[in-house]
Amino acid sequence: MKAGTDGINVYGRYPGEEAWTLLGRSTRSPFLDRRAPRQAGVREDREYHAYHMLDDEQIGQHSTTATITARE
């Protein structure tokens, strides 16, 4: 996951939103999205991408966007 860097910054959003929110930095796998569901008991799609970090700086381009269906 780290590919010779210090870790990754993980960003998330809900499909259809324009803005990405920094969810946190990860130095090991797995990264857990601890946000509560928007509606209890309903599955929802979430989108994620990440940037590598080196010396507290984001480097390169963000990863491919992954869409995950989250459940409670």
Image (tube, rainbow, N blue to C red):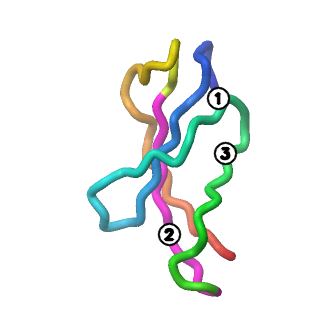
Report the number of discs: 3
| Residue 45, magenta (yes or no) | yes
Q: Could you say which quadrant of the image residue 28 lies in?
A: top right
> How far apart, in angstroms, are the residues tagged by discs 2 and 3?
17 Å
Which residue corresponds to the image point at 67% horizontal and 52% vertical from the top-left?
32
Query: In which quadrant is the N terminus drawn?
Result: top right
| Furthest-right residue in this view | 29
Q: Which residues are magenta?
A: 41-51
Q: Position of residue 4 (x, y in %)?
A: 62, 13
Residue corresponding to mark 2: 45
- Disc 2 marks which amino acid? Asp
Q: Are marks 1 and 3 in contact (CB under 8 Å)?
A: no
Which residue corresponds to the image point at 45% horizontal and 45% vertical from the top-left?
22
Residue corresponding to mark 1: 1
Is the residue marked by circle 1 packed among few (<14), some (14-19), or many (20+) residues within 10 Å? few
Residue corresponding to mark 3: 31
| Residue 1, magenta (yes or no) | no
Q: Secondary structure at mark 2?
A: strand
- Disc 3 marks which amino acid? Phe
Q: Mark 2 or mark 3, which is nearer to you?
A: 3
- Disc 1 marks which amino acid? Met
